[in-house]
Image: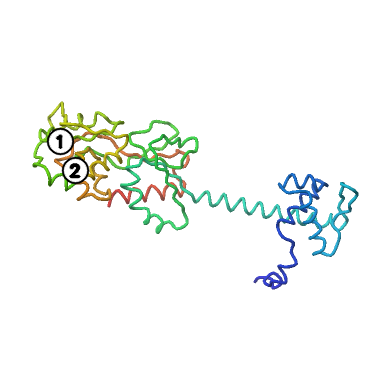
Amino acid sequence: MIDEKYSSNEGRDTLPSLANLLAFEAAAQSRSFAEAAKQLGRTPSAVSHAIRDMEQKLGVPLFKRAGRAVVLTDAGEEYFASVRDALAMLQSATRRLKQGREHHTIRVSALPFFTSAVLLPNLGRFERENPDYELRIETSNAYADVLNGDADIAIRFGRERSDHLYCKPLVGVRGQPIASADYLASTSDINSVQDLEKHTLIHVRPNKAAWREWGATQGMDDLTGKSTLTFDSILGALDAVKVGRGIALSMSPLIETYPGFGQAFVPVLMPGSSFGSVYNFVCRHTNVEDQKIRRTLRWLENSLSR
Protein backbone atom coordinates (compact mmCIF):
# COMPACT_ATOMS: atom_id res chain seq x y z
CA MET A 1 0.00 0.00 0.00
CA ILE A 2 1.28 3.48 -0.84
CA ASP A 3 1.95 5.70 2.16
CA GLU A 4 -0.76 8.36 2.10
CA LYS A 5 1.66 11.17 2.89
CA TYR A 6 3.23 10.55 -0.55
CA SER A 7 -0.05 10.14 -2.37
CA SER A 8 -1.17 13.73 -1.86
CA ASN A 9 0.07 17.02 -3.21
CA GLU A 10 0.77 18.10 0.38
CA GLY A 11 3.30 15.30 0.87
CA ARG A 12 5.04 15.94 -2.43
CA ASP A 13 5.18 19.67 -1.78
CA THR A 14 7.42 19.08 1.27
CA LEU A 15 10.16 17.65 -0.94
CA PRO A 16 12.77 19.90 -2.56
CA SER A 17 13.02 19.66 -6.32
CA LEU A 18 15.52 17.23 -7.82
CA ALA A 19 17.49 20.15 -9.27
CA ASN A 20 17.79 21.69 -5.81
CA LEU A 21 18.81 18.38 -4.26
CA LEU A 22 21.54 17.96 -6.86
CA ALA A 23 22.77 21.50 -6.15
CA PHE A 24 22.80 20.77 -2.41
CA GLU A 25 24.70 17.50 -2.87
CA ALA A 26 27.33 19.10 -5.10
CA ALA A 27 27.78 22.06 -2.75
CA ALA A 28 28.00 19.79 0.31
CA GLN A 29 30.64 17.60 -1.32
CA SER A 30 32.79 20.46 -2.65
CA ARG A 31 32.11 22.93 0.20
CA SER A 32 31.82 25.57 -2.50
CA PHE A 33 28.87 27.03 -4.39
CA ALA A 34 31.21 28.04 -7.23
CA GLU A 35 32.61 24.52 -7.60
CA ALA A 36 29.10 23.03 -7.40
CA ALA A 37 27.99 25.40 -10.15
CA LYS A 38 30.91 24.31 -12.33
CA GLN A 39 30.04 20.62 -11.85
CA LEU A 40 26.37 21.17 -12.66
CA GLY A 41 26.83 23.62 -15.51
CA ARG A 42 24.95 26.33 -13.60
CA THR A 43 25.90 29.76 -12.29
CA PRO A 44 27.02 30.23 -8.65
CA SER A 45 24.05 32.53 -8.05
CA ALA A 46 21.68 29.79 -9.30
CA VAL A 47 23.21 27.30 -6.87
CA SER A 48 23.02 29.81 -4.03
CA HIS A 49 19.38 30.51 -4.84
CA ALA A 50 18.61 26.75 -4.91
CA ILE A 51 20.16 26.28 -1.45
CA ARG A 52 18.31 29.28 -0.06
CA ASP A 53 15.04 27.93 -1.50
CA MET A 54 15.66 24.57 0.21
CA GLU A 55 16.44 26.20 3.54
CA GLN A 56 13.24 28.22 3.40
CA LYS A 57 11.19 25.14 2.52
CA LEU A 58 12.82 22.97 5.20
CA GLY A 59 12.87 25.72 7.82
CA VAL A 60 16.50 25.10 8.89
CA PRO A 61 19.87 26.46 7.73
CA LEU A 62 21.94 23.90 5.82
CA PHE A 63 25.19 25.86 5.47
CA LYS A 64 27.18 28.37 7.47
CA ARG A 65 28.43 31.05 5.12
CA ALA A 66 31.72 32.80 5.63
CA GLY A 67 32.48 34.85 2.52
CA ARG A 68 32.97 32.42 -0.35
CA ALA A 69 33.49 29.46 1.94
CA VAL A 70 30.52 27.36 3.09
CA VAL A 71 30.37 24.74 5.83
CA LEU A 72 27.52 22.37 6.55
CA THR A 73 25.54 22.90 9.74
CA ASP A 74 24.80 19.92 11.96
CA ALA A 75 21.36 19.67 10.34
CA GLY A 76 23.00 20.01 6.93
CA GLU A 77 25.45 17.20 7.68
CA GLU A 78 22.64 14.88 8.71
CA TYR A 79 20.50 15.83 5.71
CA PHE A 80 23.47 15.47 3.33
CA ALA A 81 23.98 11.84 4.38
CA SER A 82 20.35 11.04 3.54
CA VAL A 83 20.33 13.01 0.27
CA ARG A 84 23.59 11.41 -0.88
CA ASP A 85 22.22 7.91 -0.22
CA ALA A 86 18.88 8.70 -1.88
CA LEU A 87 20.49 10.10 -5.03
CA ALA A 88 22.87 7.13 -5.18
CA MET A 89 19.87 4.80 -5.04
CA LEU A 90 18.17 6.73 -7.85
CA GLN A 91 21.31 6.61 -9.98
CA SER A 92 21.69 2.89 -9.39
CA ALA A 93 18.03 2.20 -10.21
CA THR A 94 18.28 4.29 -13.37
CA ARG A 95 21.43 2.47 -14.45
CA ARG A 96 19.77 -0.92 -13.93
CA LEU A 97 16.70 0.19 -15.84
CA LYS A 98 18.77 1.40 -18.79
CA GLN A 99 20.86 -1.75 -18.80
CA GLY A 100 17.71 -3.86 -18.73
CA ARG A 101 16.27 -1.88 -21.60
CA GLU A 102 19.46 -2.27 -23.60
CA HIS A 103 19.26 -6.02 -23.05
CA HIS A 104 15.82 -5.95 -24.68
CA THR A 105 17.10 -3.99 -27.68
CA ILE A 106 18.19 -6.11 -30.66
CA ARG A 107 20.43 -4.39 -33.20
CA VAL A 108 20.29 -6.04 -36.63
CA SER A 109 22.46 -5.09 -39.59
CA ALA A 110 21.09 -6.25 -42.94
CA LEU A 111 21.54 -5.54 -46.62
CA PRO A 112 18.87 -3.26 -48.15
CA PHE A 113 17.24 -5.90 -50.37
CA PHE A 114 16.93 -8.43 -47.54
CA THR A 115 15.48 -5.71 -45.33
CA SER A 116 12.84 -4.80 -47.92
CA ALA A 117 12.00 -8.38 -48.89
CA VAL A 118 12.05 -10.10 -45.50
CA LEU A 119 12.47 -7.86 -42.46
CA LEU A 120 9.99 -5.07 -43.11
CA PRO A 121 7.06 -7.26 -44.30
CA ASN A 122 7.40 -9.37 -41.14
CA LEU A 123 8.29 -6.66 -38.64
CA GLY A 124 4.72 -6.34 -37.34
CA ARG A 125 4.64 -10.02 -36.45
CA PHE A 126 7.90 -9.72 -34.53
CA GLU A 127 6.47 -6.81 -32.52
CA ARG A 128 3.28 -8.75 -31.73
CA GLU A 129 5.15 -11.89 -30.69
CA ASN A 130 7.88 -10.05 -28.76
CA PRO A 131 6.30 -6.98 -27.14
CA ASP A 132 9.13 -6.69 -24.61
CA TYR A 133 11.83 -6.42 -27.30
CA GLU A 134 12.73 -3.55 -29.60
CA LEU A 135 14.21 -4.41 -32.99
CA ARG A 136 16.58 -1.77 -34.37
CA ILE A 137 17.38 -2.43 -38.03
CA GLU A 138 20.35 -0.81 -39.70
CA THR A 139 20.07 -1.11 -43.46
CA SER A 140 23.44 -0.76 -45.11
CA ASN A 141 25.78 -2.31 -47.65
CA ALA A 142 28.61 -1.57 -45.24
CA TYR A 143 30.23 -4.34 -43.22
CA ALA A 144 28.94 -4.58 -39.64
CA ASP A 145 31.56 -5.86 -37.21
CA VAL A 146 29.55 -8.09 -34.89
CA LEU A 147 32.61 -9.05 -32.86
CA ASN A 148 33.35 -5.43 -31.99
CA GLY A 149 29.76 -4.56 -31.13
CA ASP A 150 28.54 -2.79 -34.29
CA ALA A 151 25.43 -4.99 -34.15
CA ASP A 152 24.03 -7.93 -32.19
CA ILE A 153 23.11 -9.75 -35.40
CA ALA A 154 24.19 -9.36 -39.02
CA ILE A 155 22.45 -10.79 -42.09
CA ARG A 156 25.21 -11.40 -44.60
CA PHE A 157 25.34 -12.65 -48.16
CA GLY A 158 27.99 -15.36 -48.29
CA ARG A 159 29.59 -17.28 -45.48
CA GLU A 160 31.47 -15.56 -42.68
CA ARG A 161 34.58 -17.39 -41.45
CA SER A 162 35.63 -16.80 -37.86
CA ASP A 163 36.12 -19.08 -34.89
CA HIS A 164 34.37 -16.48 -32.75
CA LEU A 165 31.24 -16.11 -34.91
CA TYR A 166 28.14 -18.29 -35.14
CA CYS A 167 27.02 -18.46 -38.77
CA LYS A 168 23.77 -20.21 -39.72
CA PRO A 169 22.37 -20.37 -43.29
CA LEU A 170 18.95 -18.77 -43.57
CA VAL A 171 18.02 -19.04 -47.24
CA GLY A 172 19.73 -20.01 -50.48
CA VAL A 173 19.23 -17.73 -53.48
CA ARG A 174 19.43 -18.10 -57.27
CA GLY A 175 19.40 -15.61 -60.10
CA GLN A 176 15.91 -14.84 -61.46
CA PRO A 177 15.40 -12.49 -64.44
CA ILE A 178 12.50 -10.07 -63.89
CA ALA A 179 10.74 -7.29 -65.76
CA SER A 180 7.61 -5.25 -65.17
CA ALA A 181 4.28 -6.47 -66.52
CA ASP A 182 3.96 -3.27 -68.58
CA TYR A 183 7.40 -3.82 -70.11
CA LEU A 184 6.60 -7.41 -71.04
CA ALA A 185 3.27 -6.38 -72.54
CA SER A 186 5.01 -3.83 -74.75
CA THR A 187 7.58 -6.19 -76.24
CA SER A 188 7.78 -9.51 -78.02
CA ASP A 189 7.62 -12.73 -76.06
CA ILE A 190 10.77 -13.86 -74.27
CA ASN A 191 10.91 -17.61 -74.68
CA SER A 192 14.62 -18.33 -74.56
CA VAL A 193 17.90 -16.99 -73.22
CA GLN A 194 18.77 -15.84 -76.74
CA ASP A 195 15.71 -13.56 -76.71
CA LEU A 196 17.25 -11.61 -73.82
CA GLU A 197 19.92 -10.27 -76.18
CA LYS A 198 17.24 -8.10 -77.80
CA HIS A 199 16.64 -6.27 -74.51
CA THR A 200 18.36 -3.90 -72.09
CA LEU A 201 19.95 -5.91 -69.30
CA ILE A 202 20.18 -4.13 -65.95
CA HIS A 203 23.35 -4.78 -63.92
CA VAL A 204 24.35 -4.24 -60.30
CA ARG A 205 27.92 -2.97 -60.06
CA PRO A 206 29.11 -5.09 -57.07
CA ASN A 207 28.10 -8.25 -58.99
CA LYS A 208 28.97 -7.36 -62.59
CA ALA A 209 29.45 -10.99 -63.62
CA ALA A 210 25.97 -12.07 -62.49
CA TRP A 211 24.31 -12.03 -65.93
CA ARG A 212 27.22 -13.89 -67.53
CA GLU A 213 27.16 -16.53 -64.78
CA TRP A 214 23.39 -16.89 -65.07
CA GLY A 215 23.62 -17.27 -68.85
CA ALA A 216 26.21 -20.02 -68.46
CA THR A 217 23.76 -22.02 -66.30
CA GLN A 218 21.29 -21.74 -69.19
CA GLY A 219 23.77 -22.94 -71.82
CA MET A 220 24.81 -19.48 -73.10
CA ASP A 221 28.34 -18.57 -72.11
CA ASP A 222 28.46 -14.99 -73.35
CA LEU A 223 25.08 -13.39 -72.66
CA THR A 224 24.89 -9.70 -73.56
CA GLY A 225 21.92 -7.44 -74.10
CA LYS A 226 21.36 -4.88 -76.83
CA SER A 227 22.27 -2.29 -74.16
CA THR A 228 22.99 -2.13 -70.45
CA LEU A 229 22.11 -0.06 -67.39
CA THR A 230 24.27 -0.33 -64.29
CA PHE A 231 23.40 0.60 -60.70
CA ASP A 232 25.32 0.55 -57.44
CA SER A 233 22.68 -1.49 -55.62
CA ILE A 234 19.96 -4.01 -56.33
CA LEU A 235 17.36 -1.53 -55.12
CA GLY A 236 18.39 0.88 -57.87
CA ALA A 237 18.09 -1.94 -60.39
CA LEU A 238 14.61 -2.80 -59.09
CA ASP A 239 13.52 0.83 -59.45
CA ALA A 240 14.63 0.72 -63.09
CA VAL A 241 12.65 -2.48 -63.65
CA LYS A 242 9.57 -0.92 -62.09
CA VAL A 243 9.56 1.96 -64.58
CA GLY A 244 10.14 -0.36 -67.54
CA ARG A 245 13.79 0.31 -68.35
CA GLY A 246 14.72 -3.31 -68.99
CA ILE A 247 15.32 -6.72 -67.39
CA ALA A 248 17.23 -7.24 -64.16
CA LEU A 249 18.56 -10.30 -62.40
CA SER A 250 16.97 -10.59 -58.95
CA MET A 251 17.27 -13.16 -56.18
CA SER A 252 14.82 -16.04 -56.02
CA PRO A 253 12.96 -16.80 -53.76
CA LEU A 254 13.30 -13.44 -51.96
CA ILE A 255 11.92 -11.47 -54.91
CA GLU A 256 8.65 -13.34 -54.44
CA THR A 257 8.10 -11.58 -51.12
CA TYR A 258 9.20 -8.16 -52.37
CA PRO A 259 6.47 -5.48 -52.61
CA GLY A 260 5.15 -5.31 -56.18
CA PHE A 261 5.98 -8.88 -57.13
CA GLY A 262 3.58 -10.09 -59.83
CA GLN A 263 3.04 -6.67 -61.43
CA ALA A 264 6.07 -4.40 -61.09
CA PHE A 265 8.31 -7.47 -60.94
CA VAL A 266 7.39 -10.47 -63.08
CA PRO A 267 9.63 -13.55 -63.51
CA VAL A 268 11.13 -13.97 -66.97
CA LEU A 269 12.23 -17.50 -67.89
CA MET A 270 13.41 -19.87 -65.15
CA PRO A 271 15.90 -19.10 -62.39
CA GLY A 272 19.45 -20.28 -62.90
CA SER A 273 22.08 -21.16 -60.34
CA SER A 274 23.97 -17.87 -60.31
CA PHE A 275 24.04 -16.32 -56.85
CA GLY A 276 24.38 -19.93 -55.75
CA SER A 277 24.95 -18.67 -52.26
CA VAL A 278 23.04 -18.04 -49.08
CA TYR A 279 22.04 -15.32 -46.68
CA ASN A 280 23.46 -16.16 -43.28
CA PHE A 281 22.51 -15.28 -39.73
CA VAL A 282 25.65 -14.13 -37.91
CA CYS A 283 26.23 -13.38 -34.22
CA ARG A 284 28.94 -13.90 -31.63
CA HIS A 285 29.37 -17.53 -30.55
CA THR A 286 29.07 -16.44 -26.94
CA ASN A 287 25.62 -14.91 -27.61
CA VAL A 288 23.97 -17.87 -29.35
CA GLU A 289 21.95 -18.88 -26.28
CA ASP A 290 20.92 -15.32 -25.43
CA GLN A 291 17.12 -15.10 -25.36
CA LYS A 292 16.97 -12.11 -27.70
CA ILE A 293 19.25 -13.81 -30.25
CA ARG A 294 17.20 -17.00 -30.20
CA ARG A 295 13.93 -15.10 -30.59
CA THR A 296 15.21 -13.16 -33.56
CA LEU A 297 16.55 -16.28 -35.27
CA ARG A 298 13.24 -18.08 -34.77
CA TRP A 299 11.36 -15.08 -36.21
CA LEU A 300 13.62 -14.98 -39.28
CA GLU A 301 13.33 -18.70 -39.93
CA ASN A 302 9.54 -18.56 -39.62
CA SER A 303 9.41 -15.54 -41.92
CA LEU A 304 11.42 -17.32 -44.61
CA SER A 305 9.36 -20.50 -44.38
CA ARG A 306 6.05 -18.77 -45.11
Give the quarter of the figure containing the N terminus: bottom right
Residue at 45% over, 45% down: 107
Camera-nearest residue between 66 and 120? 66
Q: Amino acid at mark 1?
A: His
* Marks 1/2: CA–CA distance: 11 Å
- Residue at 86 percent across and 59 percent down: it is 61
Q: Are marks 1 and 2 in contact (CB under 8 Å)?
A: yes
Disc 2 target residue? 179
* Number of numbered discs overlaid on the protein picture: 2
Q: Is residue 114 above or below residue 203?
A: below
Q: Which residue is mark 1?
A: 199
* Residue located 74% across and 61% down the image: 16
Q: Is residue 123 left or right of residue 177?
A: right
Estimate the x, y position of residue 116 in percent, counting from the top left. 33, 47
Which kind of residue does numbered mark 2 sit on? Ala
Looking at the image, is mark 1 or mark 2 earlier in the sequence?
2
Few, some or many residues within 10 Å of mark 1 (<14, 14–19, 20+): some
Rendering coords of residue 279 (x, y %): 32, 39
Of 7 and 24, the residue lying toward us: 24
Query: Neighbour class for label 2 at 10 Å: few (<14), some, many (≥20)?
Result: many
